[in-house]
Image (spheres, rainbow, N blue to C red):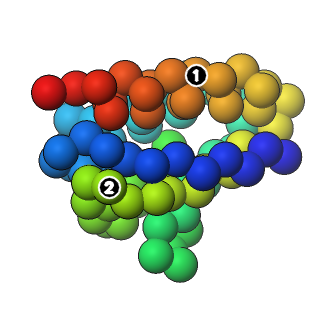
Amino acid sequence: MIEEKYKITYAQGLQARPATKIVSKANSFQAEMHMEYNDRKVNLKSIMGVLSLGVPSNSKIKITFSGSDEDDAYKAISRVISDINEMM
């Protein structure tokens, strides 16, 4: 299992567009992935779950990866979050 903390710096936080990017990428892997924010934990493969967290800009989240392709999933999700933080 891999656990990683990320800071969301995108000005709009994890609203629909960036959340869709993360969930879409997460669904391309078999590993189980969960996002935690403010003591709430949701399935990273669920758009409604991710949006329900209401993660604002400059917030820290934790994502856990577990499964046969967890390393690849971790690298891919890390890239997506980096790309989101660079969006204007």
In the displayed structure, does residue 52 sit left or right of residue 76? left
Q: Which residue is mark 1?
A: 76
Disc number lying in front (1 or 2)? 2
Coordinates of residue 73 in the picture (x, y in percent): 66, 27
Pick the front one: 82 or 66: 82
Coordinates of residue 67 in the picture (x, y in percent): 82, 38
Q: Residue at x 26, y 60 (%)?
A: 56
Find residue 35 and report its image quarter: bottom right
Residue 42 visible in the shown view: no
Q: Which residue is mark 2?
A: 58
Find residue 10 and report its image quarter: top left
Type of amino acid under label 2 = Asn
Characterize the local packing of mark 2: few (<14), some (14-19) or many (20 or more) Cα atoms within 10 angstroms: some
Residue 11 visible in the shown view: yes
* Numbered label attached to residue 21: none
Ranked by sequence position, the earlier of labels 1 and 2 is 2
Q: Residue at x 46, y 58 (%)?
A: 60
Instruction: Kindly state the secondary structure of the residue where label 2 is placed.
Output: loop
Coordinates of residue 17 in the picture (x, y in percent): 21, 35
Coordinates of residue 24 in the picture (x, y in percent): 42, 29
Characterize the local packing of mark 1: few (<14), some (14-19) or many (20 or more) Cα atoms within 10 angstroms: some
In the displayed structure, does residue 88 sit left or right of residue 63? left
